[in-house]
């Protein structure tokens, strides 16, 4: 039963909530055990802003926590609010900061960088906050994410959205940032050939980024027809059903036996890790983006060594929000095409259950 304060917060107003107000939060208690709880609205702190969350898109890593209760050795020990692809409206800002220091004002739509790096370690000082060993990441234990009505977050990690850009688009800037970072690692050159193995949301955005980077042909593979259709829409020249095709033979045939210049592995599956090394050309580059279910990556060492393959692992993103905003604002990447299903916060359990059973969903967006 909702309290009067909670009912008030369910409206569309972005006014500061009254002291003692409560909010909704979707918390994961264990494998496939998600509850919509009622919690106090978090209090504003130094250097922080209070954001009324409006949109959270569900990522594959969220599904890992829901389905398996962990990612690698990261395992929640307390109820956890998932969601790190998020955007909302500023409600209040630490008075010690103000508009001049942050460029933010109440009512403004913002994208939220989910990574709070320490800014002091060697990796942060070298410009690699995505590799910070002390990073706190939204929706990753022990830091709550965005599937709640309100979130307090460092003000310097909020990015104002241009006029007319929706919070849905703002939430999708995070996966676009992953694709941008993966493309940066790949160092795609004009007229390169690229294979994207796995055409989920990150794979689709990687296809688009590869095209924008000058790839002359982008090949895409996946197990699901709706994703293969989306891959062609995002710019793939040719696609193949990985369940019905010998992908190694297919890509060798499409490249005259040479192999592709770059492979972006975005599925996180044992077969795609192995395929990546087999289909890249000698001296080519493989970027591993997908997260494996069993926390293991295996490929043929002889082929990788013989070809002198450069293998890189993509760890989240770094400094990509301004570029992601610019691409979306210029219309070079249409993020709205990713969203195939929308759910209100009180139906977030249905969204996770649908994804878990393999429903034909490209990207599920929780919006309220």
Image: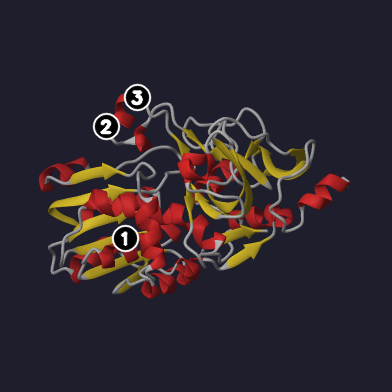
Residue at 30%, 64% (x, y): give it: 246
Q: What's the CA distance linking mark 3 and mark 1?
A: 34 Å
The image quarter containing residue 355 is bottom right
| Quarter of the image with the C terminus in it | bottom right
Q: Position of residue 356 (x, y in %)?
A: 60, 53
Q: Are marks 2 and 1 in contact (CB under 8 Å)?
A: no
N-terminal of the pair, mark 2 or mark 1, is 2
Tag 3 residue: 121
How would you rate the neighbour count of disc 3 (Cα within 10 Å): few for under 14, some for 14-19, many for 20 or more? some
Q: Position of residue 155 (x, y in %)?
A: 51, 40
Q: Are marks 3 and 1 in contact (CB under 8 Å)?
A: no
Q: Position of residue 209 (x, y in %)?
A: 31, 62
Q: Position of residue 57 (x, y in %)?
A: 55, 55
Tag 1 residue: 196
Q: What's the CA distance linking mark 2 and mark 1?
A: 30 Å
N-terminal of the pair, mark 3 or mark 1, is 3
Q: How many marks?
A: 3
Tag 2 residue: 126
N-terminal of the pair, mark 2 or mark 3, is 3
Q: Which of these two is toward me, 161 or 60?
A: 161
């Amino acid at each position: 039963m909702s309290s009067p304060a909670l009912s008030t917060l369910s409206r569309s107003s972005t006014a500061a909530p009254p002291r003692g107000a409560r909010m909704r939060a979707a918390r994961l208690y264990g494998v496939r055990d998600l509850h919509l709880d009622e919690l106090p609205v978090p209090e504003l702190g130094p250097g922080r802003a209070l954001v009324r969350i409006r949109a959270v898109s569900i990522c594959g890593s969220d599904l890992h926590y829901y389905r398996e209760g962990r990612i690698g050795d990261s395992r929640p020990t307390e109820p956890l609010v998932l969601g790190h692809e998020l955007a909302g409206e500023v409600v209040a800002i630490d008075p010690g900061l103000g508009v001049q220091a942050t460029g933010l004002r109440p009512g403004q739509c913002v994208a939220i960088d989910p990574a709070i790096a320490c800014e002091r370690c060697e990796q942060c000082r070298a410009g690699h906050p995505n590799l910070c060993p002390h990073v706190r990441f939204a929706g990753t234990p022990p830091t709550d994410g965005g599937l709640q009505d309100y979130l307090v977050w460092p003000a310097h990690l909020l990015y104002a959205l241009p006029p007319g850009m929706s919070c849905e688009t703002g939430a999708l800037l995070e996966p676009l940032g992953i694709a941008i970072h993966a493309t940066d690692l790949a160092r795609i050159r004009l007229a390169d050939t690229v294979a994207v193995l796995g055409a989920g949301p990150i794979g689709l955005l990687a296809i688009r980024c590869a095209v924008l980077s000058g790839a002359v042909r982008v090949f895409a593979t996946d197990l699901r027809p709706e994703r293969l259709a989306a891959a062609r829409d995002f710019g793939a020249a040719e696609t193949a059903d990985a369940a019905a095709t010998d992908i190694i033979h297919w890509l060798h045939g499409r490249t005259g036996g040479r192999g592709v210049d770059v492979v972006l592995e975005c599925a996180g599956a044992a077969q795609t890790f192995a395929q990546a090394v087999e289909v890249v050309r000698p001296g080519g580059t493989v970027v591993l983006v997908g997260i494996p279910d069993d926390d293991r990556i295996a490929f043929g060492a002889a082929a990788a060594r013989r070809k002198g393959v450069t293998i890189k692992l993509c760890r989240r993103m770094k400094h990509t929000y301004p570029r992601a905003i610019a691409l979306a604002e210029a219309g070079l990447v249409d993020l709205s095409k990713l969203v195939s299903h929308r759910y209100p916060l009180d139906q977030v359990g249905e969204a996770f259950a649908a994804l878990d059973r393999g429903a034909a969903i490209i990207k599920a967006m929780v919006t309220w």
